[in-house]
Amino acid sequence: MTMSTPHTFDIGDPRRRAYRTRLRDGAFTFVGSRAVSEAIVHLVGAFPKHPPRRVLLVRDPGAVATLAAAALWPEAEVTAHHFDAFEHKSATANLDENPTPLRPGLLLAPDLPVGPFDLVAMAAPSGMESLLVRELIEQAHDTLRVDGRLLVATDRSPKRLRKVVKEVFGRADLQGATRAGGVVAARRRCEDPRRRDHDHVALAVRGASTLRIRTRPGVFSPGRIDPGARALLSSFDATPGSRVLDLGCGVGVLGLCAGVDAGPEGVVMVDSNARAVAVATDNAVANDLGLATVVLRADLEDLPGGPFDLALANPPYFSQGRIAAAFARAAARALSPGGRLLMVAKAVPAHREILESFFGSVSCSDVSGYGVFEARR
Protein backbone atom coordinates (compact mmCIF):
# COMPACT_ATOMS: atom_id res chain seq x y z
CA MET A 1 0.00 0.00 0.00
CA THR A 2 1.46 3.40 -0.99
CA MET A 3 0.46 7.03 -0.61
CA SER A 4 -1.86 8.39 -3.32
CA THR A 5 -2.87 11.86 -2.04
CA PRO A 6 -0.72 14.94 -1.25
CA HIS A 7 0.25 15.52 2.36
CA THR A 8 0.93 18.78 4.20
CA PHE A 9 2.95 18.69 7.44
CA ASP A 10 3.36 21.46 10.00
CA ILE A 11 6.78 21.44 11.65
CA GLY A 12 8.75 23.70 13.97
CA ASP A 13 7.56 26.68 15.97
CA PRO A 14 3.88 27.32 15.02
CA ARG A 15 4.39 31.08 15.52
CA ARG A 16 7.09 31.24 12.81
CA ARG A 17 5.90 28.97 10.02
CA ALA A 18 6.86 31.19 7.10
CA TYR A 19 8.45 28.61 4.79
CA ARG A 20 6.73 26.12 2.50
CA THR A 21 8.89 23.37 0.98
CA ARG A 22 7.44 21.02 -1.65
CA LEU A 23 9.01 17.56 -2.03
CA ARG A 24 8.54 14.78 -4.58
CA ASP A 25 6.82 17.01 -7.15
CA GLY A 26 4.32 18.31 -4.63
CA ALA A 27 3.44 14.99 -3.00
CA PHE A 28 4.60 16.49 0.33
CA THR A 29 4.50 20.07 1.55
CA PHE A 30 6.30 21.02 4.76
CA VAL A 31 5.31 24.29 6.43
CA GLY A 32 7.87 25.39 8.99
CA SER A 33 10.00 28.08 10.57
CA ARG A 34 12.79 27.35 8.09
CA ALA A 35 13.16 25.75 4.69
CA VAL A 36 13.84 22.03 4.52
CA SER A 37 17.54 21.35 3.92
CA GLU A 38 18.59 20.49 0.37
CA ALA A 39 20.09 17.19 1.53
CA ILE A 40 16.70 16.11 2.91
CA VAL A 41 14.94 17.33 -0.25
CA HIS A 42 17.24 15.12 -2.34
CA LEU A 43 16.84 12.19 0.06
CA VAL A 44 13.04 12.19 0.07
CA GLY A 45 13.03 12.59 -3.70
CA ALA A 46 15.04 9.39 -4.00
CA PHE A 47 12.76 7.25 -1.82
CA PRO A 48 11.72 4.15 -3.81
CA LYS A 49 8.05 3.70 -4.67
CA HIS A 50 8.13 0.02 -3.72
CA PRO A 51 7.57 -0.09 0.06
CA PRO A 52 10.42 -1.57 2.12
CA ARG A 53 9.46 -3.51 5.21
CA ARG A 54 11.96 -2.01 7.69
CA VAL A 55 13.43 1.47 7.22
CA LEU A 56 16.11 3.33 9.17
CA LEU A 57 16.42 7.13 8.81
CA VAL A 58 19.72 8.73 9.88
CA ARG A 59 20.51 12.43 10.42
CA ASP A 60 16.92 13.71 10.08
CA PRO A 61 16.71 16.35 12.83
CA GLY A 62 13.31 17.80 11.94
CA ALA A 63 11.71 14.42 11.18
CA VAL A 64 10.95 15.57 7.62
CA ALA A 65 12.25 12.40 5.97
CA THR A 66 10.69 10.35 8.77
CA LEU A 67 7.22 11.82 8.19
CA ALA A 68 7.57 11.45 4.43
CA ALA A 69 8.60 7.79 4.79
CA ALA A 70 5.68 7.06 7.12
CA ALA A 71 3.24 8.65 4.65
CA LEU A 72 4.77 7.05 1.56
CA TRP A 73 4.94 3.55 3.11
CA PRO A 74 2.14 3.44 5.72
CA GLU A 75 2.69 -0.24 6.48
CA ALA A 76 6.46 -0.07 6.87
CA GLU A 77 8.29 -0.16 10.20
CA VAL A 78 10.11 3.20 10.20
CA THR A 79 12.82 4.04 12.75
CA ALA A 80 14.69 7.35 12.98
CA HIS A 81 18.05 7.52 14.75
CA HIS A 82 19.33 10.65 16.49
CA PHE A 83 22.58 11.45 18.26
CA ASP A 84 21.39 14.74 19.71
CA ALA A 85 18.77 14.99 22.45
CA PHE A 86 17.58 18.41 21.25
CA GLU A 87 17.04 17.09 17.72
CA HIS A 88 15.31 14.03 19.18
CA LYS A 89 13.00 16.32 21.18
CA SER A 90 12.21 18.42 18.09
CA ALA A 91 11.51 15.31 16.02
CA THR A 92 9.19 13.99 18.73
CA ALA A 93 7.26 17.27 18.75
CA ASN A 94 6.90 17.18 14.95
CA LEU A 95 5.60 13.60 15.04
CA ASP A 96 3.13 14.58 17.75
CA GLU A 97 1.96 17.49 15.57
CA ASN A 98 1.50 15.23 12.52
CA PRO A 99 0.15 11.83 13.61
CA THR A 100 0.64 8.92 11.20
CA PRO A 101 -1.27 5.60 11.11
CA LEU A 102 1.84 3.70 12.22
CA ARG A 103 3.97 6.03 14.32
CA PRO A 104 7.69 5.87 13.50
CA GLY A 105 10.06 4.88 16.26
CA LEU A 106 12.62 7.41 17.44
CA LEU A 107 15.94 6.19 18.80
CA LEU A 108 18.39 8.39 20.73
CA ALA A 109 21.64 6.41 20.89
CA PRO A 110 25.43 6.62 20.38
CA ASP A 111 25.37 4.29 17.35
CA LEU A 112 23.00 2.98 14.72
CA PRO A 113 20.75 0.12 15.84
CA VAL A 114 21.25 -3.52 14.94
CA GLY A 115 19.13 -4.51 11.93
CA PRO A 116 18.47 -6.02 9.64
CA PHE A 117 16.87 -3.15 7.72
CA ASP A 118 15.71 -3.20 4.11
CA LEU A 119 16.55 0.46 3.57
CA VAL A 120 18.88 2.90 5.34
CA ALA A 121 18.38 6.52 4.22
CA MET A 122 20.79 9.15 5.47
CA ALA A 123 21.48 12.87 4.99
CA ALA A 124 25.12 13.97 4.81
CA PRO A 125 24.96 17.77 4.46
CA SER A 126 27.96 19.95 3.77
CA GLY A 127 29.84 20.70 6.97
CA MET A 128 29.20 17.24 8.41
CA GLU A 129 32.39 15.72 9.78
CA SER A 130 33.90 13.50 7.06
CA LEU A 131 35.04 10.75 9.42
CA LEU A 132 31.55 10.58 10.96
CA VAL A 133 30.07 10.24 7.47
CA ARG A 134 32.37 7.29 6.76
CA GLU A 135 31.63 5.63 10.10
CA LEU A 136 27.87 5.96 9.63
CA ILE A 137 28.11 4.52 6.11
CA GLU A 138 30.06 1.57 7.54
CA GLN A 139 27.45 1.10 10.29
CA ALA A 140 24.67 1.41 7.71
CA HIS A 141 26.25 -1.38 5.66
CA ASP A 142 26.35 -3.68 8.66
CA THR A 143 22.78 -2.97 9.77
CA LEU A 144 21.32 -3.66 6.31
CA ARG A 145 20.23 -7.13 5.30
CA VAL A 146 22.08 -8.63 2.38
CA ASP A 147 20.66 -6.93 -0.75
CA GLY A 148 19.34 -4.13 1.46
CA ARG A 149 19.69 -0.64 0.04
CA LEU A 150 21.52 2.49 1.19
CA LEU A 151 20.61 6.03 0.15
CA VAL A 152 22.89 8.91 1.18
CA ALA A 153 22.01 12.46 0.17
CA THR A 154 24.12 15.60 0.20
CA ASP A 155 23.69 19.27 -0.68
CA ARG A 156 27.01 19.55 -2.49
CA SER A 157 28.71 17.63 -5.28
CA PRO A 158 28.30 13.94 -4.36
CA LYS A 159 31.49 12.75 -6.06
CA ARG A 160 33.52 12.49 -2.85
CA LEU A 161 30.59 10.87 -1.06
CA ARG A 162 30.29 8.33 -3.85
CA LYS A 163 33.96 7.42 -3.39
CA VAL A 164 33.40 6.66 0.29
CA VAL A 165 30.26 4.59 -0.37
CA LYS A 166 32.07 2.64 -3.09
CA GLU A 167 34.97 1.88 -0.73
CA VAL A 168 32.53 0.47 1.84
CA PHE A 169 29.94 -1.23 -0.39
CA GLY A 170 32.04 -2.12 -3.43
CA ARG A 171 29.77 -0.20 -5.78
CA ALA A 172 27.95 3.13 -5.66
CA ASP A 173 25.53 4.77 -8.10
CA LEU A 174 24.70 8.46 -8.47
CA GLN A 175 21.09 9.63 -8.70
CA GLY A 176 20.34 13.10 -10.02
CA ALA A 177 23.81 14.38 -9.18
CA THR A 178 24.53 18.11 -9.60
CA ARG A 179 26.87 20.60 -7.98
CA ALA A 180 23.95 21.46 -5.68
CA GLY A 181 23.69 17.92 -4.39
CA GLY A 182 22.36 14.49 -5.14
CA VAL A 183 22.01 10.96 -3.83
CA VAL A 184 24.42 8.04 -3.73
CA ALA A 185 22.82 4.57 -3.73
CA ALA A 186 24.31 1.16 -2.99
CA ARG A 187 23.31 -2.36 -1.97
CA ARG A 188 24.85 -4.67 0.58
CA ARG A 189 26.25 -7.64 -1.32
CA CYS A 190 27.92 -9.78 1.35
CA GLU A 191 27.70 -10.84 4.98
CA ASP A 192 31.15 -9.52 5.88
CA PRO A 193 31.00 -6.48 8.21
CA ARG A 194 32.57 -3.21 7.15
CA ARG A 195 32.65 -1.28 10.41
CA ARG A 196 36.12 -0.13 11.47
CA ASP A 197 37.43 1.43 14.67
CA HIS A 198 37.81 5.19 14.15
CA ASP A 199 38.43 6.02 17.82
CA HIS A 200 41.61 7.70 19.05
CA VAL A 201 43.18 8.26 22.46
CA ALA A 202 44.51 11.68 23.51
CA LEU A 203 46.47 12.38 26.69
CA ALA A 204 45.68 15.07 29.26
CA VAL A 205 48.20 15.74 32.04
CA ARG A 206 46.71 17.04 35.28
CA GLY A 207 49.16 17.34 38.16
CA ALA A 208 50.65 13.92 38.75
CA SER A 209 47.91 12.22 36.71
CA THR A 210 47.91 11.46 33.00
CA LEU A 211 44.39 10.86 31.70
CA ARG A 212 43.78 8.74 28.63
CA ILE A 213 40.87 10.38 26.84
CA ARG A 214 39.14 8.37 24.13
CA THR A 215 37.63 10.41 21.29
CA ARG A 216 35.13 9.41 18.62
CA PRO A 217 33.87 10.85 15.34
CA GLY A 218 30.75 12.90 15.94
CA VAL A 219 32.01 14.22 19.29
CA PHE A 220 33.76 17.57 19.40
CA SER A 221 37.47 17.56 18.49
CA PRO A 222 37.93 13.91 17.46
CA GLY A 223 41.50 12.64 17.65
CA ARG A 224 42.85 15.38 19.92
CA ILE A 225 42.12 17.67 22.83
CA ASP A 226 40.88 20.96 21.42
CA PRO A 227 43.30 23.91 21.89
CA GLY A 228 40.49 25.94 23.45
CA ALA A 229 39.97 23.21 26.02
CA ARG A 230 43.71 23.18 26.74
CA ALA A 231 43.62 26.97 27.26
CA LEU A 232 40.77 26.55 29.74
CA LEU A 233 42.53 23.67 31.51
CA SER A 234 45.54 25.88 32.18
CA SER A 235 43.29 28.56 33.71
CA PHE A 236 41.72 26.85 36.71
CA ASP A 237 42.31 24.63 39.70
CA ALA A 238 39.26 23.13 41.36
CA THR A 239 39.34 23.17 45.16
CA PRO A 240 39.24 19.72 46.80
CA GLY A 241 35.65 18.88 47.68
CA SER A 242 34.14 21.57 45.44
CA ARG A 243 31.23 20.89 43.12
CA VAL A 244 31.98 21.33 39.40
CA LEU A 245 29.64 21.48 36.39
CA ASP A 246 31.00 20.75 32.90
CA LEU A 247 28.56 22.21 30.35
CA GLY A 248 28.71 20.57 26.93
CA CYS A 249 31.22 18.05 28.21
CA GLY A 250 32.05 16.31 24.92
CA VAL A 251 34.52 13.52 25.68
CA GLY A 252 34.75 14.80 29.26
CA VAL A 253 38.27 16.20 29.44
CA LEU A 254 37.37 19.39 31.37
CA GLY A 255 35.16 17.68 33.92
CA LEU A 256 37.55 14.78 34.45
CA CYS A 257 40.55 17.07 34.98
CA ALA A 258 38.43 19.00 37.47
CA GLY A 259 37.66 15.65 39.08
CA VAL A 260 41.39 15.05 39.57
CA ASP A 261 41.55 18.37 41.45
CA ALA A 262 38.32 18.26 43.42
CA GLY A 263 37.47 14.56 43.58
CA PRO A 264 35.03 13.03 41.10
CA GLU A 265 32.11 12.80 43.54
CA GLY A 266 31.21 16.46 43.05
CA VAL A 267 31.60 16.57 39.26
CA VAL A 268 28.58 16.65 36.94
CA MET A 269 29.10 16.55 33.17
CA VAL A 270 26.25 17.23 30.74
CA ASP A 271 25.86 17.10 26.97
CA SER A 272 23.02 16.86 24.45
CA ASN A 273 24.94 14.34 22.31
CA ALA A 274 24.25 10.71 23.24
CA ARG A 275 27.61 9.61 21.84
CA ALA A 276 29.44 12.28 23.87
CA VAL A 277 27.71 11.14 27.06
CA ALA A 278 28.62 7.51 26.37
CA VAL A 279 32.28 8.36 25.65
CA ALA A 280 32.60 10.69 28.65
CA THR A 281 31.13 7.96 30.88
CA ASP A 282 33.63 5.42 29.53
CA ASN A 283 36.49 7.89 30.00
CA ALA A 284 35.50 8.51 33.60
CA VAL A 285 35.53 4.79 34.38
CA ALA A 286 38.77 4.16 32.45
CA ASN A 287 40.57 6.88 34.44
CA ASP A 288 39.30 5.77 37.88
CA LEU A 289 36.94 8.76 38.05
CA GLY A 290 33.76 6.74 37.71
CA LEU A 291 32.05 8.53 40.61
CA ALA A 292 31.57 11.56 38.35
CA THR A 293 28.01 11.98 37.06
CA VAL A 294 27.39 12.21 33.31
CA VAL A 295 23.91 13.14 32.08
CA LEU A 296 22.18 13.53 28.71
CA ARG A 297 19.97 16.61 28.42
CA ALA A 298 18.28 18.38 25.51
CA ASP A 299 18.03 21.83 27.14
CA LEU A 300 20.32 21.67 30.19
CA GLU A 301 17.19 21.05 32.24
CA ASP A 302 16.97 19.34 35.64
CA LEU A 303 20.71 19.15 36.30
CA PRO A 304 21.55 17.04 39.35
CA GLY A 305 24.11 17.81 42.02
CA GLY A 306 23.86 21.60 42.36
CA PRO A 307 24.42 24.24 43.41
CA PHE A 308 27.93 24.32 41.97
CA ASP A 309 31.04 26.23 42.94
CA LEU A 310 32.54 26.16 39.44
CA ALA A 311 31.12 25.75 35.94
CA LEU A 312 33.26 25.10 32.85
CA ALA A 313 32.25 25.68 29.24
CA ASN A 314 33.88 25.44 25.82
CA PRO A 315 30.89 26.25 23.57
CA PRO A 316 30.99 25.48 19.83
CA TYR A 317 31.45 28.40 17.49
CA PHE A 318 28.98 27.40 14.77
CA SER A 319 25.82 28.54 16.59
CA GLN A 320 26.38 32.35 16.45
CA GLY A 321 26.45 32.49 20.23
CA ARG A 322 23.20 30.61 20.83
CA ILE A 323 24.85 27.72 22.65
CA ALA A 324 27.18 30.03 24.59
CA ALA A 325 24.10 31.92 25.79
CA ALA A 326 22.41 28.66 26.79
CA PHE A 327 25.51 27.64 28.77
CA ALA A 328 25.68 31.05 30.47
CA ARG A 329 21.99 30.92 31.37
CA ALA A 330 22.34 27.39 32.80
CA ALA A 331 25.42 28.35 34.81
CA ALA A 332 23.69 31.42 36.25
CA ARG A 333 20.91 29.14 37.49
CA ALA A 334 23.14 26.34 38.75
CA LEU A 335 25.98 28.21 40.51
CA SER A 336 25.96 28.95 44.21
CA PRO A 337 26.33 32.60 45.34
CA GLY A 338 29.90 33.61 44.55
CA GLY A 339 30.31 30.66 42.17
CA ARG A 340 32.32 31.06 38.98
CA LEU A 341 31.79 30.25 35.32
CA LEU A 342 34.92 29.84 33.20
CA MET A 343 34.22 29.95 29.46
CA VAL A 344 36.72 29.87 26.60
CA ALA A 345 35.98 31.67 23.34
CA LYS A 346 37.50 33.05 20.15
CA ALA A 347 34.85 35.73 19.53
CA VAL A 348 35.76 37.75 22.62
CA PRO A 349 33.49 40.83 22.22
CA ALA A 350 30.41 38.74 21.38
CA HIS A 351 30.95 36.37 24.29
CA ARG A 352 31.61 39.22 26.70
CA GLU A 353 28.25 40.71 25.75
CA ILE A 354 26.54 37.36 26.28
CA LEU A 355 28.10 36.81 29.68
CA GLU A 356 27.41 40.35 30.90
CA SER A 357 23.72 39.78 30.24
CA PHE A 358 23.72 37.01 32.88
CA PHE A 359 26.52 37.93 35.31
CA GLY A 360 27.45 41.09 37.18
CA SER A 361 31.20 40.51 37.16
CA VAL A 362 32.94 39.41 33.94
CA SER A 363 36.68 39.47 33.18
CA CYS A 364 38.73 38.02 30.34
CA SER A 365 42.33 36.82 29.99
CA ASP A 366 44.21 35.99 26.80
CA VAL A 367 45.51 32.42 26.98
CA SER A 368 47.29 31.02 23.93
CA GLY A 369 45.23 33.21 21.61
CA TYR A 370 41.89 32.35 23.25
CA GLY A 371 39.76 34.48 25.50
CA VAL A 372 39.17 32.76 28.84
CA PHE A 373 36.30 34.48 30.64
CA GLU A 374 35.61 34.38 34.35
CA ALA A 375 32.06 35.33 35.33
CA ARG A 376 30.92 35.44 38.94
CA ARG A 377 27.40 35.02 40.20
Image (cartoon, rainbow, N blue to C red):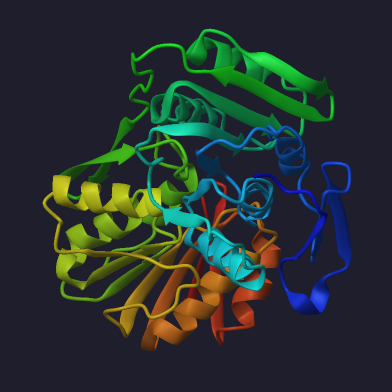
Residue placed at 78% from the left, 41% from the top?
Answer: 38
> Whole-percent x and y of residue 306?
30, 83
Given the current orientation, which residue lies at the most extreme front position?
A: 1
Give the camera-side residue of 37 and 49. Answer: 49
Give the camera-side residue of 348 and 132. Answer: 132
Quadrant for residue 355, please give it: bottom right
**Residue 359, relative to residue 109: is it above or below?**
below
Quadrant, the N terminus: top right
> Whole-percent x and y of residue 194?
38, 18
Residue placed at 56% from the left, 11% from the top?
Answer: 166
State left or right for residue 268 relative to residue 357. left
Given the current orientation, which residue lies at the most extreme bottom position?
A: 337
Given the current orientation, which residue lies at the most extreme top position?
A: 170
Q: Is residue 271 visible?
A: yes
Give the camera-side residue of 191 and 122. Answer: 191
State left or right for residue 326 relative to residue 218. right
**Residue 294, relative to residue 138: is it above or below?**
below
Quadrant for residue 175, please give it: top right
